[in-house]
Amino acid sequence: MTNANRQITFAARPTTWVGEEHFALQTNTIPTPGNGEMLVRNLYMSVDPYMRGMMNTGPSYAAALEIGDVLSCRVVGQVVTSNNPDFVAGDFLFGMLRWEEYSIACGHEDLRKINPDLAPISWHLGVLGAPGLTAWVGMMELGQPKAGETVFVSAASGAVGQIAGQLARLHGARVVGSAGSDAKLAYVLDQCRYDAGFNYKSVSSFDAALAEHCPNGIDVYFDNVGGAMLDAVLLAANEFARLTECGMISQYNLDEPRGIHNLALFARKRLKMQGFIVRDHYHLLPQYLIDMAGWQKSGEVTYREDIAEGLEAAPSAFIRMLKGENFGKQVVQIATV
Amino acid sequence: MTNANRQITFAARPTTWVGEEHFALQTNTIPTPGNGEMLVRNLYMSVDPYMRGMMNTGPSYAAALEIGDVLSCRVVGQVVTSNNPDFVAGDFLFGMLRWEEYSIACGHEDLRKINPDLAPISWHLGVLGAPGLTAWVGMMELGQPKAGETVFVSAASGAVGQIAGQLARLHGARVVGSAGSDAKLAYVLDQCRYDAGFNYKSVSSFDAALAEHCPNGIDVYFDNVGGAMLDAVLLAANEFARLTECGMISQYNLDEPRGIHNLALFARKRLKMQGFIVRDHYHLLPQYLIDMAGWQKSGEVTYREDIAEGLEAAPSAFIRMLKGENFGKQVVQIATV
C-alpha cells in the first residue's frame, strides 16, 4: 500500500450536457484518521442522477458543488484503521463518502455496517440500498397499486425502475415499462417479468405505445424521466391515477426544460402527483431489507448491475448513466477486497 | 304567462376563444311535466368555467355538447306545477337544469329544496352551492393549510377564490391572492381580508410579485388559472407544498396549452399536486352549509356576486367570466320572483 490517494474533483460547471472535461483526477496522500474517525478503503461507489443537480448553482435538494471539490457519493468500503468504537478494521460498511480511493469517515455519513455474506456487497448501492428503498417508497407508499390496476414505469431497467416494477407485480398489478434498447426491454420482460413494455426509442409515438401496451389506461405512473413521456402519461391516465415523481432524467441536461402541456387534465381526471426524496424515508430501510432479502432468496425479484472498472472510469460511467447507456444499476468498482 | 319558453342553444363549436356566435337564442313552447316530473320557472342560472370544456370534443369531465343542444347549467328556480311528491308549487329549488326560462325536472338533477329566507336565493349558485363547496374541499381537504403557513390563491376575487382564501384565513394561514384589476384586488384585501395580494396584469413578473408578497415561500397553492402563474408558484413553493388543482382558466381557450417548465422541482421539493371535482364531494355539502351560514351570520366570510340581467345575457356573461371581466361570482338573473 503506497501513500497515494487518487480523487476525482469537480473541475468545471456544465450548463447543458455534462462531459469528462467537467471532472479532474488528482492524487493526494492518504489521510490519517483523527479521534473518533476511521480510514475507509473504498471498494464500490454509486453514480446517481441526483448528482447532476449538485453541479448546478441555485436551488437543489443536494448542496451545490464548488469547483475543486472532491465529489461525494454513496460508497461500500472496508475499514482500514478505526478510532470509532462501533467499527473495527476489516468491517464492511456503507456510507456517503467521496469519489476517491480512501476516505475519512467521521461518523456522520449515514454509516451502516454490512454483512458481506448476505449478498454481493455492491448491492448495498442498489437493490439493498437507496435505489431499492426509493422504488419501495415511490411505488408502495405513494403509488399504492391495487391488484389488477395498470402500473407504468419509465426507465424500467434502471437502478430504481427494475425494482419498482417488480414490487408492483408482487402486489398484483399489471406492470408495463419503457426502456431505451431492445436488450433492456428483453431484460424487463424476461427477467423482471413485466407484463408488457416498449423500447421508447423505436416507437413512432409515446401516445400510441401507451395505448397499445396499457389498453385499460394507467392507474399508477412511476416517473423517472419527465418530459414528453409525462405528457403522454397524463393523456393515458385513468381517473384517480397516482403519479410518483422520482426524477426527470430527460430534463437534467437541458438548458431549458421541455414544457408539459397536459396538466389541465388534473382536475377532470382527479390526478395526484407527488414528489419525494428517499432520505426522508430511511426509517423504512430495516423492514425493506428484510422483505427484499426474502424476495431475492425466493427468486421473486431479480437485480442487474452495470459495473465500471476503476476510479478513473467514474466520470464516464456517470455520463453514460445520464445518457441511458448503462444497462442496470450503474456502479464503479474502485478496488477489490 | 305566455306559452313561450326562450332557450339558448350551442350553435357552433369554438376552437380557441368562445364568442357569442357559438350560441343561438330560440323560442320554444313551455313543456308539460309528465308523471313524477315538475315544471320549474328558472330564476337564476350560473355560468362556470367547466362549461368551456363541454364545448370541446374529446375527453372532458362533463359530457361533450352536440350542436343544437340547449346548454345545461346550475339553476335556482321555483316550482310551477309538480307531479313529484317531494315538491309543491311555489317551492324554491336548486338543480342542474338548462339555459332556458322554464325547465322540466325529472328528479335526477341534483334537486335540492331551498329556504328563501336563509340568504339571497342566488347564493345557492355560489357561496352556498358548488363553488363554495369547491373552495372548501380544495382548501381544507386537499390544501390543509396550517396556522402560520402561506396560502396563495389565484383568481382570488372569483366565485371559488374569494371563498377559498377566506377559509384559509379562518384557519390561521397567511393568505395572498392575485386578481385581474385594482378594484378586484381592493375587494380581496379589504372585504375578504387577504393579508396581501397583487394585480397580475400590472406586475412586471410573477416571480417578483410572489417573492414580494410571499417572502416565506408558498405552502399551499389553490390554482384556478394554470399557465405561467403555476410555473411561478412551482419556483416559489416551499418543500412539502400542496398544490390544489381546481381549474386552469387561462388555458381553456387556447389552441395549444402553454407548457409548464418547472415540474422537475417536484422531487426535490417533495411537492404534491392534486386535482378534484366537487361532485365527488357533495356528501360534505350539508355540514358545509351549516358552517358557512354561521360564518356569514358572524360576518367572518363575505361574498360578492356579479349579476347579469336576462337569459339573453347569458352567453356574454359566460364569455366575460372566461375573460376575467366579471367581478365576483357570475350569475344570470332570468326572472324575478
Image (cartoon, coloured by chain):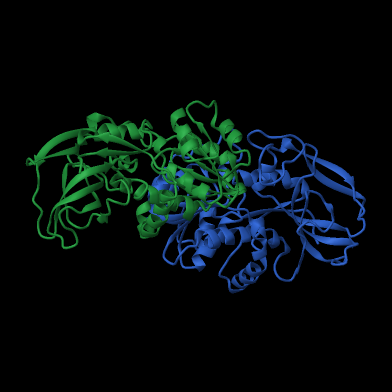
Chain colours: A blue, B green
Q: A92 or B227, which lies in front?
A: B227
Judge whether B335 appears above or below A120 on screen. Answer: above
Quadrant of residue A95 within the rendered picture: bottom right
Residue B80 rendering spot, x and y as whole percentages: 13, 50
Q: B128 or B143, which lies in front?
A: B128
Residue A290 seen from this side: yes
Residue A189 rendering spot, x and y as whole percentages: 49, 60
Q: What residue lies at 42% left-to-right and 62% top-to-bottom?
A: A149
Judge whether A203 appears above or below A94 on screen. Answer: above
Q: B274 or A171, which lies in front?
A: B274
Q: A45 or A202, which lies in front?
A: A45
Q: What residue lies at 30% left-to-right and 42% top-to-bottom?
A: B51
Total number of numbered discs in the rendering? 0
Report the side of B305 relative to A332 (left or right): left
Report the side of B97 relative to B297 (left or right): left
Picture quarter with the N terminus of chain B: top left
Judge whether B55 appears above or below B183 on screen. Answer: below
Residue B169 rendering spot, x and y as whole percentages: 52, 47
Q: What residue lies at 48% left-to-right and 44% top-to-bottom?
A: B165
Quadrant of residue B5 within the rendered picture: top left
Quadrant of residue A204 within the rendered picture: top left
Residue B16 seen from this side: no
Residue A10 rendering spot, x and y as whole percentages: 76, 39
Report the side of A162 relative to A272 (left or right): right
